[in-house]
Image (tube, coloured by chain):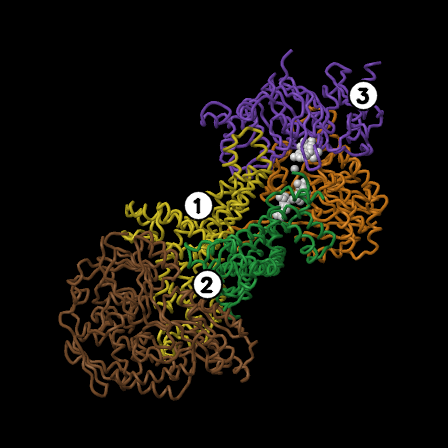
Amino acid sequence: ATPGVLVRSDSPPANLDPHQLFDVPMMGYALNAYDGLYRYENNPPELQPWLAEGHTASADGLEWEFRLRPEVRFHDGAPLTAEDVVYSFRRVLALGKAPASAFLGILKPENVTAPDARTVRFRLERAYGPFLAAIPIVAIVNSRLVRANEKDGDHGAAWLAGNEAGSGAYAFVPGSLTTLERLDMARFEGHFLGWSDNPSPVPRIAVRAAKETSTGVLGLLNGSIDWTDSYLPTDQVEQIQGSRVAQVAKDVSMRTFIIRMNNARAPFTSLNLRKAMAHAFNYDGFIQEILKGYADRNAGPIPNQLWGAPKDAPGYAYDLDKARHFLKLAQAEGFNPRQQIRIHIQSQLEQTNQAAQLFQSDLQSIGVNLRIVADTWANIVSATAKPETSPDMWIHWVSTYFVDPENWVGQMYDSRFHGTWKASSFYRNEKVDALLQRARGLVAQAERAPLYEEATRQVMADCADIWVYNTVELRGLARRLSGYRFCPAGGGAEMRWLQMKG
Amino acid sequence: MTPILEVQDLSVSLGGRRRWLGRSIPPVQAVRGVSLAVAPGEVLGIVGESGCGKTTLGRTILGLQRESGGEILLDGKRVSGLAPQAARRVRNSIHYVHQDAGAALDPWWSIGRTLEEALAIQGIGDRPARVAEVLAAVGLDAGAARRYPHELSGGQLRRVALARILALRPRVVILDEPTSGLDMSVQAMVLTLLRDLRVRYGLTYLFISHDLSVVRRFCDRVAIMYLGRVVELAPTAEVFAAPRHPYTRSLLEAAPRLTGRRAAEAAPLAGEPPSAARLPPGCAFAPRCARSSAACRAEDPALALRDGAEVACHHPLERAMA
Amino acid sequence: MLVLRKFLRDIPAVIGAVIILFVVILALFGPWIAPYPEDASASHLLRRLKPPSAAYPFGTDNLGRDILSRVILGARGALKVALVVVGLAMAIGVPLGLLAGYERGVLAEAIMRVTDVFLALPQLILALALAQLLGPSVESAMLALTLTYWPFFTRIVHAETQRLRNALFIDALQGIGAGTPRILLLHILPNILSPIIVRATIGLGFTILVAAVLGFLGMGATPPDPDWGLAVAQSRTYLPNAWWFATFPGLAILIAVLGFNLLGDGLRDLVDPRLRRSR
Amino acid sequence: MAGFIARRVLLVLPSLLGLLVVTFLLIRTVPADPAVALAGDNATPEQIEAIRRQYGLDQPLLVQFGRYLAGVARLDFGASQFSGRPVAADIAQRLPATLELTFAALLIGAGLGIPLGVVAAMNHNRWPDFLLRILSVGGIAIAAFWLAIMLQLLFAMQLGWLPLRGQLSVGLTPPGGPTGFLLLDSLLHGRLDILGDALRHLVLPAVTLSVGGLATIARFTRAGVLDTLQKDFVLYERAVGFPRRRMVWIYVLRNSVVATVSQIGLLFGSLIAGAVVVEAIYDWPGIGSYTVQAILTADAKVMLAVTLLVGVIYAAVNILTDLALALIDPRIREGR
Amino acid sequence: MTVPALAITGLRVGIRSDEGMARILDHIAFSIAPGCILGVVGESGCGKSTLIRTILGILPPAAEIVAGSILFEGEDLRAFSEAELNRAVRGSRIGFVPQDPYLALNPLFTIGAQLLEVMRWHAPGERRSHSTRLVELLRRVQLPDPEAALARYPHQFSGGQRQRLLIAAALACSPRLVIADEPTTALDVTTQQQILRLLRELVDELGIAMLFVTHDLGVVAELCDEVSVIYAGQTVESGPTAAMLDRPLHPYTRALLACHPDRSEGFTGIPGAVPSPLRAPPGCRFAPRCAGARPACTGRSPAPQWPEPGRSVDCILYEAKAAA
Ligand SMILES: Nc1ncnc2c1ncn2[C@@H]1O[C@H](COP(=O)(O)OP(=O)(O)OP(=O)(O)O)[C@@H](O)[C@H]1O
Ligand SMILES: Nc1ncnc2c1ncn2[C@@H]1O[C@H](COP(=O)(O)OP(=O)(O)OP(=O)(O)O)[C@@H](O)[C@H]1O
Ligand SMILES: [Mg+2]
Ligand SMILES: [Mg+2]
Ligand code: NI
């Protein structure tokens, strides 16, 4: 263990611009280097005012005003004003990259304005329920700094990809970046929240990506790594728990594991076949034996603990007799069991492979021929643009991009999203489309929840996909760390709360 | 009588390479303006030191090497000016026995197969009989057909090489140093064999050698070569009795003889032949020649008939000197 | 008989031959030899990652399958990949090398330049493209390997042919009027067999290894094939705890490759008639 | 000599162009849509379409290739479609690490492989020879990452002699010197502490990577020495009483390494391929892992640049090999 | 009587091969007086090179000295250890001139490096004086531009020049005996003549002994004081050159001389072939080809006879004569 330095073995983001990327490594960086207007804290996640002291929304849900905290400073000492917020949102929209997707259809750049130095006003094109839930996505950047480094109208994209212009609790150490390999951060004394609540904060963070699980585990065990990513293989947990220098933090997350079926193309146009498949997956075996119990059965698309998930909806259970029964019905409809069904896995992700093999083994016993195809994320995502090219089945997780049912059932089963990987079941049901459309247009959670619940029930009844579990995130932590806080949005990557001995 | 084979002013340059960027390598003038005529049934010896162009001359006549100038006539018909493959086709009555008989056989092929192959290439049928015949003709027993080249001795390999071309019924045979590297006792047998075969098959030989004592007994006429040029061409007896070119004389004197030490004789020829790639102007022998004059160093003498012998020298030795 | 005696004295070569014989037997009769042949595809969740024991001498893998059985069943695939790739690469590389080495001029130059291009082409990138084009499978991986391996043969054959082209026995053949195809195929080819054999045996091992890496990147063998390389790749997540998962398939690769190489060295000495003399 | 190098460099250019064309076409056969990768995880189809236009991905192939070539000529390889960062900068940052690693591996491979080959040849057909033959083939056959993990377990975990991973200890910052090569820079800055630390980090990855090459080098050296021992001059040297050691290690060896040196050119390619695995396990910040990332994300710009880079390195190593051969053999020097 | 520079008696050497033990050398015997050149003549494969390798102790691993003694200036070389031979005999007290000057020099090292290497180990003194001495020697062997020669590589010399270099190297450490293995076979006749003259001069000048191996009787006639003829690994006849060429005693010597072009007008060979050392018959190995062979010839080895002073012959015919 290096005194005064916390070594993280998760990967730094591919570039440092929080407006270009929106993935787990970026969260691991941006939650520390940048601040947003709001932020999710705790588990289950609560939306907390962060740079904003609070907000008001008009009754029709179109006008939103956020009031900023006073005295917030960027790492270069410049004060953070409404101007920076406006610049940041407009920049996100102009770049049009991943973080923009939540806002693209509903917010025009010119409709983000700053009536005064501490007030930011948004005018939406139409009411959008998840708007507030998506607010934390946008990191606020130091507009003067970024503007100064703009080139050929790139909004400073080239510069910010390798530099930092934030106000977060930790500041990027210039020159310490090797893309995807390493980057250093130092504690920012002047963070607006102050450090009085943390008696021994981590002075310095060194991100050193460990690409092989075994190296990460060994590093944790010999003390050269303090913190791993949160996807530790369950088979390693026991060994780490038994160590004197490290332990495993286990937190229920909001990240659902799903086996997709291409509903728009034979053979999965058949509901009976889909049901047969859903009954043929050994959920308990997978969760208890392979994942050693570190996962919760999640019978529907929305994580159990989130509002909008119907608590009473019966899921599908592992029952080969039922599977055979539905298979017979499907055969009656014309399904030929000798037909090969292809399931694409992400060969980098061992769990998708294991699930597929387990599934294959069971399906074989009821006479369905499943062929496993190893594939990469980039290819699968390209293939899901059209139902003709989209795989018969594939396996993936849906993480918490923003904490709202819209992130799951909304974007997965509304036919307007066909063509994105999230909607790759190509499920189409007008009733569900209508329900989701309405839920999206409302602001109050109490009004929206029943709509999402109903839509979800319908999707489950139609057995659009095979929903397996909700993740328990497993992160290896050195025992010299304490005060670890997990939040499903961001996966516990915020390090402000951590205390370190030595 | 028309010569069976005639060579007129033949020149061959080898190995020159022009390279794109970088130093070019100038070609080596391996054969320079050689003219010869071989009568049917004759044995013409070609003698010279290593590197003087004997092999090159033979290969060019055979057609494996393309000449850079001059003519080759076979039975009075012009057969030069062709690319190697075509040249081989029109000259298929000429054959060649290589200097290193062992290396001229494919180590992976048994002797029998090698011999049959030669016949197969020429499209000749009745192979086993022909093979047996030629093996017998060169004095090998039929069992040799099953052996591999590395299992045979040097003398036997030469027999195989002969058998191989005899099977093709040649008229002119170019023998490239057929006795070099052989022991005296074996050498004698090979030569006897060559002589017998000549009579039996009516062959004409171009006999390349550096061994004067062999040439003396085997050839009808001799051409002495020095650095790509024929410097003297005369009937064998005359050359040995009365050499005309100073180089020929030095060569004769240098040959070791059973009669022992000749301390009284002229000192050995000094120095060594210059590199073929960097020839001096004028007579190539001039730098080593005791008789050389300014004329020698300026002008290369042409082969000219003098007293019944062809000599290329400005100051040939007198007849009486011998 | 002499040949056999000579071979038997070359201890490493004999070891190699025994290994290869063993691998071939496994490849042919694997399903009858393996204790749990159904473990080619079945999974047994209740006995995951069990260390070696009497029932499972090599332990079990991440899906509770008997590793011994899978190692035995994997022999066929490994052998197939290795033989097909090296065979195809030779079929492409050797004729091109012969041609480029024997002929001079534009054609030869062009062949060698193309060879250089393929030699410099990163294997992984080519493999990826092919996996995409033809669908990820053992076959496309084999094609990718073939396409990157043939230049090795071309290079060697080219150099050796160039060396031999000036040999006296080739000269003699030209002298008796042998045509180019005859010289190339019947004379030059056998004479350069020994470097080809060496390259091929190195290639057999190399292919098994690279196929494993491709399998791991999702461009080669697909689960649940009992592929050795795939097993080694999958085992990485469970190291260092489940050492047996990585070790036994890894050993299988090592031993098979060892066998090919040792045998190849021995063969080279054996096929060459010039080496049949005493040493 | 300068002319020789210039000629070789000019001759390499057409091959490199061919390489680029082949790679470009190959990559374009990959259905993975770079625009999708660019747009990121949660993008809408409209976003993807916009990005496609923005990056000219909707243009005809030839136009795209032309634009790419024009960039390459200015040493501009474009921006990664995955990270948006300039590829040239990323490669410049990572290449020194990979080169340092491969050269170290080559050094170990040659430093051990050549003597082992000589020892085996000197004991032809006796047990040291058998042992070496088996071990060297084993070296070629061993799975690199399995070996890597075993070495980690032994030297980093069990014995604790060497660091587990990385290129430099966390507490140290690279001197950021003129060359980009960590070892060289720390030396230039006189930072011996960094040099020592970096060397300690280098040991395990370099050893792992060297194993395959070591075996190959040993094998070729053995063959070369056996061959040379048959030469007449060896007999002569023995007959006039050259001391045995000097004869073998100087006079014979120099004649034998010709084949070995020519192999190193080919070996370098496989070393770089091997670096992919080794870099991943030891978290070495080189181009190996960068390439795998690019392949997994179908990042065409990076794949093209890496291909070109490998081609250039390959050509450079071959030219260096030729130079080395010329140094070893005076006859080559004179262009015979 | 002075001690001979080299005296070999009853030497027998075998080589183990796949097909059994090959008896390459069978009772070889001869001796060389100081200041004298002994020519060892024999056909290809009769074991000349093996004999030299035996004397120098550099036989292949499969070879074995079965019997005999090799006395060099009275000391038995067989009793020397490998290290002693290397330090005190090879290259120092016994100089060596190899057969093929084209192949005997290491192509990758300069002449200076290779030749000085020999001197450095065998002659006391420092490098500077070594190179001075070497340059002098090179001048003595008439190598053009001897100073510059040390920095050049073997391929930059012609065959004749290389042979001169090797002769200089053989003399570098003031040896008592020089062994030359067909040093002129690879050269042209004119060059051969130059080299032979040079060797003769050097031997006379330095008073050393020389063992000169060749297959060419003509060369022997020109150079050697004494001759020893070997057939298939057996010494058949030894004696002064002139006498032996005039009046050969052994049937083999006679047959060999009869083949020489200087002696015969036609081409007479010796019928039959040299027996393989693997299946060598007991007794006289020439017997199967010998016109005067008797049944006794194949039964046992002939004992050496001395029909004339200074001449010895190994043939049963002379045993009979001596007995008579
Ligand atoms: N391929 C080649 N390229 C360049 N020069 C060559 C080539 N082949 C031969 N030479 C040169 O041509 C000259 C004649 O060679 P050639 O082989 O004809 O000589 P030779 O009289 O047969 O010699 P030897 O008695 O040694 O066989 C020599 O100087 C030789 O170096
Ligand atoms: N290493 C070996 N193993 C087996 N037999 C050998 C070996 N070396 C030589 N011989 C055999 O020993 C015999 C004598 O060989 P050697 O080289 O001494 O003959 P040589 O008289 O020098 O011949 P040349 O005149 O051709 O040089 C030959 O029959 C040869 O085949
Ligand atoms: Mg010749
Ligand atoms: Mg010899
Ligand atoms: Ni003149």
The type of residue carrying mark 3 is Ile
Furthest residue in direction top, as rendered: E1
Q: CA distance from mark 2 to mark 3?
A: 94 Å
Say what secondary structure mark 3 lies in. Answer: helix
Q: Is residue E15 left or right of residue A405?
A: right
Are the residues flagged by discs 2 and 3 in contact, CB closer than 8 Å?
A: no
- Above or below, B44 relative to D310: above
Say what secondary structure mark 2 lies in. Answer: helix
Q: Is residue D75 left or right of residue C218?
A: left
Colour representing chain A: brown
Badge 3 crowding class, 10 Å Cα cut-off, few under 14, some 14 to 19, many 20 or more, is many
Task: Residue B71 in the image: state x and y as whole percent.
Answer: 72, 53
- The residue at which mark 1 appears reads as D108
Colour representing chain E: purple
The type of residue carrying mark 1 is Ile
Res C46 label = 2
Res E316 label = 3
Tell me the chain of label 1.
D
Q: Is residue A481 left or right of residue B140?
A: left
Furthest residue in direction right, as rendered: B200
Say what secondary structure mark 1 lies in. Answer: helix
Could you tell me which residue is drawn at 23 percent across and 88 percent down?
A: A60
Colour representing chain C: green
- Share a chain, discs 2 and 3? no
- Above or below, D33 relative to D6: below
Q: CA distance from mark 2 to mark 1?
A: 46 Å
- Above or below, C37 relative to D322: below
Q: Is residue C105 visible?
A: no
Q: What chain is the yellow one?
A: D
